[in-house]
Amino acid sequence: MVKNIDIDELYLDDVAFDRRILQRMKRAMNTVKPDCFIDLHSNTGFSRGPAIQYAEFFPYVDKLWFGESFLYNKMTPENWLIEVSGIPYGLMGDMLHAGGNRWLGMQYGMTVRQPWMTEGIVVDPRPIWKIWDEFDIQKSKMIGFWETNTPVKTNNNNVKITTYLKSGISLISIGNYDDEAKEITLNYDWRQLGIDSQKAKLIAPEIKGFQSAVELPSKSVIKIEPRKGWLFYLK
C-alpha cells in the first residue's frame, strides 16, 4: 500500500497482535517511505486502560486516539496526562467521546479530530486551531503543569496551568478540574516569561463555543466554571 497507493499512515483500531508485528510494519513502511505514521486508537472497554495495554507499542506509533467511552468530565489531571495525552511517551493525542472537553484538552494541546460526530454531537475544533495558527503555537515551548519550573502557577491545587511560551508573549491554558466554580489568582515568573510585570495583561480572544473576549490586568481574580477554563494571551 505504501509503494503502490502512496499512503502515508496506517490507523489501527484496537488490535490484538503483538509488538513484533508492529515492529515489522513500521520497518516495512519506512523502507519504502521514511517517516510514515502509525495512528493507534483504543477505548476503555477492551482493557483496564489502553496506556497499559499498548505501552510496548509506543516506540513504533506516532499518534494516539485513546478516548472512546472516556469520561472527560470526571477524570483527574493524572488520568488525563497518563492515559489520554500521550505526552509522557513522547506522543501526541486527540480527544473523542462526546467531543471531549475543549477547555481541559488545551492543557495537553489536544482537540478532537475534524470532521467528527460522536454521541450525536457535531464537533468542530477549527476555532481552537485558528488561535493556534494566529499564535504560531508550533514555535512555542509547551510547559505543562506537571513540570517543576513552570512560569505561571495558580493558588488552587484543583486549577492547573499549561503555558505555551514565546518571547514577549505566551498562551496560557487555565483548567478547573473541580466540580465547583473557582476564583483564582496567578503567580508569575516574569524573568522566565520575558515580560515586563508593570505592563503585563491577560487577553482572552473570543473563541466560538469556548469563551468570550475579555481583557484583564495580570493580577486579576479569575472565575472559572466547573470543568472548564480559559485561554489567555499573556503579554
Image (cartoon, rainbow, N blue to C red):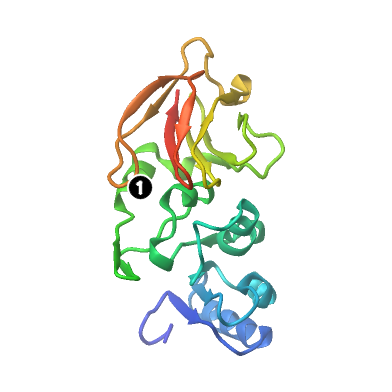
Foreground residue, 55 or 213? 213
Q: Residue at x 43, y 37 (%)?
A: 230
Residue 103 at x, y = what percent?
44, 47
Residue 91 at x, y = what percent?
58, 61
User: If the image is split into quadrants, where does the C terminus sit?
Assistant: top left
Q: Residue at x 55, y 45 (%)?
A: 178
Vertical placement of residue 14 versus 186, above or below = below
Q: Residue reaching furthest front?
A: 180
Please give the residue where the numbered disc 1 appears in the rendered image: 128
Element assignment for label 1: helix
Q: Is residue 169 visible?
A: no
In the picture, measured across the screen, residue 186 lies left or right of residue 115, that is right
Foreground residue, 178 or 206? 178
Q: Residue reaching furthest top?
A: 198
Q: Residue at x 52, y 72 (%)?
A: 34
Residue 144 at x, y = what percent?
60, 43
Q: Is residue 182 visible?
A: yes
**Residue 118 lies in quadrant:** bottom left
Q: Residue at x 41, y 51 (%)?
A: 102
Foreground residue, 141 or 177? 177
Label 1: few (<14), some (14–19) or many (≥20) C-alpha neighbours in 10 Å: some
**Residue 191 lies in quadrant:** top right
Numbered marks: total: 1
Identify residue type, mark 1.
Answer: Ile
Residue 1 at x, y = what percent?
41, 87
Vertical placement of residue 178 versus 85, above or below = above
